[in-house]
Image: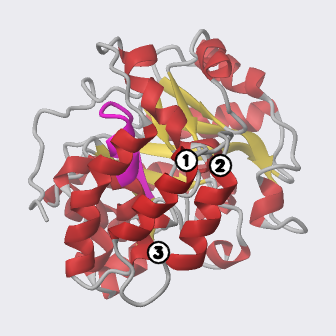
Amino acid sequence: MIQPVVNKEKTSESLDRRFSVAPMMDWTDKHCRYFHRALSRQALLYTEMVTTGALVHGDKDRFLQHDAVEYPLALQLGGHDDKDLAFCASLAEERGYQEVNLNVGCPSDRVQNGRIGACLMAEPQTVANAVKSMKEKVSIPVTVKHRIGINGRESWQELVDFVGTVAEAGCDTFIVHARIAVLEGLSPKENRDVPPLKPDWVYELKTQFPALSISINGGIKTFEEIDHHLKHVDGVMLGREAYQNPYLLSEVDGRLYGCQKTTLSRFDVIEKMIPYIESELSKGTWLSHITRHMLGLYHGEPGGRRFRRYISENAHKSGAGVDVLLEAVRQVESL
């Protein structure tokens, strides 16, 4: 593995946030990020949420492990204690992450019990204190990802007050999931679909706070939608669509960053992944831990279901290697 080093060139001003892939629990692990980086060199990637407790009391190396090829890369933290968050932010900077992001959007009961995630929207001063402490500790950007509200605090004025309070503490970048979070009665999965999207609220935040960087998240699936959002806000963050239809990322560099367009086929992506897969297999990683993130590569294509099925049925077997992946590709290409 490439040993990560602190990237001093990625300042708050130079970190391009036009397109990013959302932090997603159980999804955006290091294997997923390596795969996404094979599709786009420019997209800003995020880790899964790592709690402060995991870093303060747990195996720091395991939770912070990444490869420098994943850069630009942000670490998302979950927590509320400003001292713990500042300590964890300093670890992130030491390990080479280019941004620290505070999770104020996750609605699950498990994180609520630890005063983590969306429940902190009811405590704007707590979030502000955390941001202030982290910014005093690190030189990399400190950002906040949040909802437009939570049940019981759903008004436009409460959203403005939240952003204003946190901005006064020094946060200049907000990533806004354009739904409220319902903290009782809905599962995390339902919270990604049931509350209605209100993108106009995110647009209006940019109008109210023109000096801030505002990115939008939630329900975005196409480049037409991305182009529309970017007329109103500074950045777009994709979640499930980037994971379930990852080949969409192959167009990001050309369409959004003006990079010289090269035709990157799905097989090109597979070939990029093979050295990484072989390296990980040699360390004892199971093939399925990597290929589970690649199942959507042929999403919407003839044979896409066959590709997913072959990998799902074979990648978990003892001794499974890259031949499983190549055979899955052959079954698709034969069509």
Q: Which residue corresponds to the image point at 47% horizontal and 23% vertical from the top-left?
A: 212
Which one is in front in this view, the residue at disc 2 or the one at disc 1?
1
The spot of residue 328 in percent (x, y) is 51, 60
Q: Amino acid at mark 2?
A: Gly
Range drawn in magenta: 35-47
Image quadrant where residue 275 sits:
bottom left
- Marks 2 and 3, how far apart at CA: 20 Å
| Residue 39 colored in magenta in the image | yes
Q: Mark 2 sits on what residue?
A: 303
Q: Are marks 1 and 3 in contact (CB under 8 Å)?
A: no
Of the residues tagged 2 and 3, which is closer to the observer?
Answer: 2
Pointer 2 or 3: first along the chain: 3
Of 153 and 327, nearer the camera is 327
Secondary element under disc 2, as helix, strand or loop, is: loop
Image position of 236 with respect to 309: above or below:
above
Report x, y in % for residue 24: 55, 58
Local crowd size for mark 2, using a 10 Å CA cut-off: few (<14), some (14–19), many (≥20): some
Which residue is the site of mark 1?
Answer: 334
* SS for dot 3: helix
Q: Are marks 2 and 1 in contact (CB under 8 Å)?
A: yes
In the image, is 209 to the left or to the right of 106? left
From this viewpoint, which residue is outermost toward the front?
Answer: 334
In this figure, what is the number of numbered marks? 3
The quadrant in which residue 172 appears is: top left
Q: Which mark is residue 288?
A: 3
Quadrant where the N terminus is found in the figure: bottom left
- Mark positioned earlier in the residue sequence (1 or 3): 3
Q: Is residue 39 above or below residue 276?
A: above
